[in-house]
Image (cartoon, rainbow, N blue to C red):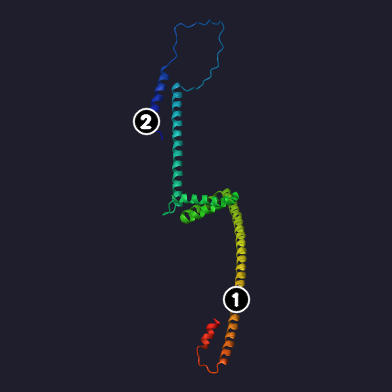
């Protein structure tokens, strides 16, 4: 809207301009060149009445047009300001609805960015799709861990945008397909690593069992040898004891057995 001061100044300027135009008249000089009169009657000219506005009306119209243009510009500025205020209120409402109470964007957003960078570093030797998928997975996982409600609200807003704009839905589907391919590749790699680890574990287990069986067989062999040696020693001891007993008719010396044991040792 135009302020009253501007309107008053514009009206004053228009009135002054109209007054100056009305006062200024063409000057008629006394000495003018006389034309030679014709002997014949001049033909009567056709009289055409043309309605033309006066200078005052023209000036008033110009001033009115200027005022109307200025007023229209003011209305357009007001409309732009109203749209900006509406956009600002919508953005503020969207942000308030997205950020859950009790959850802080800073420094959690920095942690999410660091997690995304870590995902890129982890998969730096892979292709671009896998690097992007790994970085996105790390970022989303960290966001769900630090800001679960805010992340859920962001997902709902994205879902509404996809429903409102079909191209976004198509891009999301392509992203899901790429993420699925990357996940399949990761699963295949993990399966290969797991298979190799299982094979190595089975080989180590078989070697350990074989070594255990070898040690057990050797221990059994040594035990059997010791048992056979002990039985032979016991037989020899009994044989010597029997010979000694036969040598003495009466056992007047009970320390014979101890003596024989000492000798056998």
Residue occupied by mark 1: 222
Q: Is residue 186 above or below residue 45?
A: below
Give whichever of discs 1 and 2 has the lower sequence position.
2
Q: Residues within 10 Å of mark 1 (few under 14, many from 20)?
A: few
Question: Is residue 147 visible to the viewer in this orientation of the structure?
Answer: no
Q: Residue at x 37, y 30 (%)?
A: 5
Residue occupied by mark 2: 5
Which mark's residue is nearer the viewer, 1 or 2?
1
Q: Is residue 238 above or below residue 12?
A: below
Viewer-proximal residue among 206 and 245: 245
Q: Residue at x 56, y 89 (%)?
A: 244
Question: Is residue 130 visible to the viewer in this orientation of the structure?
Answer: yes
Q: Residues within 10 Å of mark 2 (few under 14, many from 20)?
A: few
C-alpha separation, residue under disc 1 versus residue under disc 2: 122 Å
Residue 205 appears left or right of 25: right
Viewer-proximal residue among 92 and 25: 92
Residue 28 appears left or right of 164: left
């Amino acid at each position: 809207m135009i302020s009253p001061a501007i309107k008053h100044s514009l009206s004053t300027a228009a009135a002054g301009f109209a007054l100056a135009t009305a006062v200024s008249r063409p000057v008629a000089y006394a000495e003018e060149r006389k034309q030679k009169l014709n002997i014949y009657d001049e033909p009567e000219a056709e009289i055409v009445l043309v309605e033309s506005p006066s200078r005052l009306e023209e000036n008033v119209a110009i001033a009115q047009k200027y005022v109307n243009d200025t007023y229209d510009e003011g209305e357009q500025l007001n409309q732009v300001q109203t749209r900006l205020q509406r956009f600002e209120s919508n953005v503020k409402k969207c942000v308030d609805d997205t950020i859950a109470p009790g959850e802080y964007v800073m420094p959690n957003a920095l942690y999410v960015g660091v997690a995304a960078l870590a995902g890129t570093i982890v998969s730096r030797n892979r292709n671009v799709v896998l690097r992007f998928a790994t970085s996105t997975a790390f970022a989303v996982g960290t966001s769900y861990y630090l800001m679960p409600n805010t992340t859920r609200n962001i997902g709902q807003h994205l879902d509404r945008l996809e429903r409102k704009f079909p191209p976004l839905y198509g891009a999301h589907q392509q992203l899901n397909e790429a993420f699925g391919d990357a996940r399949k590749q990761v699963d295949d790699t993990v399966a290969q690593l797991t298979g190799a680890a299982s094979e190595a574990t089975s080989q180590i287990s078989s070697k350990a069992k074989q070594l255990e069986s070898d040690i057990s067989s050797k221990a059994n062999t040594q035990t059997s040898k010791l048992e056979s040696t002990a039985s032979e020693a016991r037989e020899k001891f009994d044989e010597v004891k029997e010979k000694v007993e036969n040598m003495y008719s009466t056992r007047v010396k009970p320390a014979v057995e101890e003596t024989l044991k000492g000798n056998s040792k």
